[in-house]
Image (cartoon, rainbow, N blue to C red):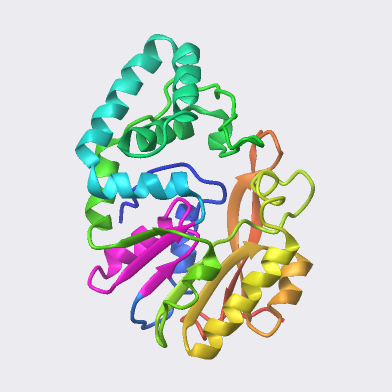
Amino acid sequence: MEIPTIVKWAGGKKQLLDQFKTLYPKEFNDYYEPFIGGGAVFFHLKQLDGHRKYFISDNNKDLVEVYRAVKDDIDQLIKLLETYKKNHMKNPKEHYYKIRDDFNKTTSGVERAAEFIYLNKTCFNGLYRVNSKGGFNVPIGNYKNPGIVNEKSLRKASRLLQGVEIECMPFEETLKLPKKGDFIYLDPPYHPLSETSSFTSYTKEDFTEKDQERLLEYYKKLDRRGCLLMLSNSDTEFIKQLYRDYDLHKVKAKRAISCKGEGRGEIKELVITNYKTKKQTKLN
């Protein structure tokens, strides 16, 4: 199964989908994903069964704008990205900083979505980072031939997004939506393994331990409602203690092993469920 890629996102789950197959609930009704990120789990499940209701959201308005553009304006989006690709190959640095400036002035719409995708594919490590004024400030990355536009992948993503509800909201605002028997996958910013954990260090100030505790309360409320919950996070004592009353599973992931993104190493991550899985691997 081919999983479409719209953007590079910290802690992407595409590499984990084979391990996730045994961790999904056997049966569920509607699907909710409040931290959509790169969307690999959503795209995987949508292809396995496209007939149920799907709801995806994120608190990052720029990311949500991208998903809406892919869903509703794919032809214009691809046209803009092809133009950006052509201009980038002529003068990468000059074009990158021009688009970055334009992005920080553009308010909304397909043009901003195209700028976001272009910057995501050409900036340093695919990072999303803004300054105190909300301006995107990541420098250009060192790529000989960045994959700025993959028309086949984008069009597949657009087809899979048809009929899907896409919203911009904090995770807690989605609390009222799921019903008993619905499945919610949670992929929040990870609790940092260390001060230099490359895929957490750019989010830990925005998603603190207090926020992780708020997410636990969200998890508990939906658990009591009879929803099916699966959550990903880093394998730290803090997270294991928070979710000690639930089933903790470990999966293996290859992640950047330094804050500069130099090299990749295999680490273990946690997947936390409130239901028994097909392959029960609960930790002691």
- The front one of 19 and 204 is 204
Rendered residue at 30%/56% (across/down): 1
Q: Left or right: where does residue 63 sit relative to residue 149?
A: right
Q: Left or right: where does residue 197 sit relative to residue 188?
A: right
> Could you tell me residue 114's position as x and y percent?
35, 33
First to last magenta residue range: 31-58
Is residue 5 visible from the viewing direction of this image? no
Rendered residue at 58%/37% (across/down): 134
> Could you tell me residue 90's position as x and y percent?
38, 9
Determine if the magenta segment contains residue 174: no
State whether residue 48 is above or below residue 155.
below
> Could you tell me residue 216's position as x and y percent?
65, 75
Rendered residue at 46%/81% (across/down): 278
State whether residue 12 is above or below residue 276.
above
Determine if the magenta segment contains residue 46: yes
State whether residue 254 is above or below residue 217.
above
Q: Left or right: where does residue 66 sit relative to residue 15?
A: left
- The front one of 192 and 104 is 104
Rendered residue at 34%/22% (across/down): 85
> Could you tell me residue 161's position as x and y percent?
28, 56
- The front one of 167 and 93 is 167
Quadrant of the image occupied by residue 138: top right
Is residue 68 visible from the viewing direction of this image? yes
Q: How many marks?
A: 0
Query: Please, which residue is most extreme toward the top here?
Result: 90
Quadrant of the image occupied by residue 149: top left
Q: Quadrant of the C terminus?
A: bottom right
